[in-house]
Every structure is written in C-alpha cells, then in structure tokens.
Image (cartoon, rainbow, N blue to C red):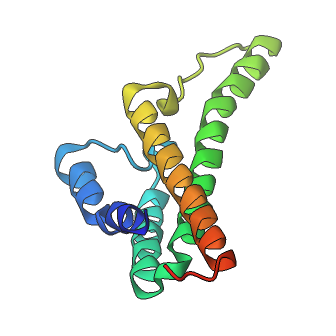
Amino acid sequence: MRRLLLFYYLSTPAFVALDLLLGVNVRTVFLDASPWRWVYYAAALGCGVVGWRRPALAPLVGMAESGLSLALLIIGIYVPIWEMAEAAGSELGGPVAMSPVLTPRGLVNVALSGSSFLVGFYGNQAAFIAARRGQSR
C-alpha cells in the first residue's frame, strides 16, 4: 500500500504537466484558477519525498494530505451554495458561478483524494496491526 501512495505523490510532476501543457487540472480542482495550486503541487511532491525517505510515515502523510484535499473539495462545493443564498437574499441578485468541483474534473479529484485517504488509512491500520503482532513491515 505504501508503494501505491508513493507512486501517487511522486507522480505529481505528471499532474503538473497535465495542468501546464493541456490545461487539465484534476489534482487541485479546489484551487482551479488560483496561483496557490502550484504551492499545493509542491507540497504534494513533498509528501512523496517524505514517504520515500521515511516509508513508515507514508500512510500518515497520505491521510493528512488527502484529508486536507477532501476538506477543500467540500468547501469548494459549499462556497457557491452560500453565494447563491446570499445573492437570493440581496436586492441585486447577480449570477453565481458553479463550483469547479461539480464537474467531471472535480469528480476525478474526489476519487484520487478519497482513494489516497483510504490507502493511507488502511495502510496505517495494517502497520499498526503488524506492530502489535511483533512483525515489521
């Protein structure tokens, strides 16, 4: 399981290339047009380096990063809903943009983040069980 997480995080340059060359952002949809997505890409690659250098931390790092990603995706869904509620209550009532999370790219991002979280969670659980049995992984 750790290898899968390691592959996911160390493949971040491929996600950056998709974003830069093809304009397909499936890893940081919650930061779609923000320059902060480049910081997030760097942090994700940093998670891969930590997992590579300290394999025992890979499941915990995976859970932390993917948990943050899922939280930001959820916020990305609710912000337009809040804006719509505010627009409905105001006299001006302008148009409200749809969340980029509610697109096929957003669903891919949710699937990647959710899978990473599950792999990290169950990898961490397996490592804990192995440690309790006196085995090392």
Q: Nearer the viewer, residue 43 or 36?
A: 43
- Quadrant where the N terminus lies? bottom left
Residue at 59% x, 20% y is: 96
| Quadrant in the picture for residue 78 | top right
The picture places residue 71, in percent across and down from the top left corner, at: 65, 47
Residue at 53% x, 83% y is: 136
The picture places residue 77, in percent across and down from the top left corner, at: 62, 31
The picture places residue 91, in percent across and down from the top left corner, at: 79, 12
Q: Is residue 4 visible?
A: yes
Q: How many marks?
A: 0
Q: Is residue 8 above or below residue 128?
A: above
**Image-based side of 129 in relation to 137, left or right:** right
**Image-based side of 14 in relation to 137, left or right:** left
Q: Is residue 31 visible?
A: no
Q: Nearer the viewer, residue 133 or 1?
A: 133
Q: Is residue 103 above or below residue 136?
A: above
Q: Is residue 67 above or below residue 33?
A: below
Q: Nearer the viewer, residue 51 or 77?
A: 51
Residue at 36% x, 68% y is: 3
| Quadrant in the picture for residue 104 | top left
Q: Outermost residue toward the left? A: 21
Residue at 44% x, 67% y is: 44
The picture places residue 49, in percent across and down from the top left corner, at: 40, 80
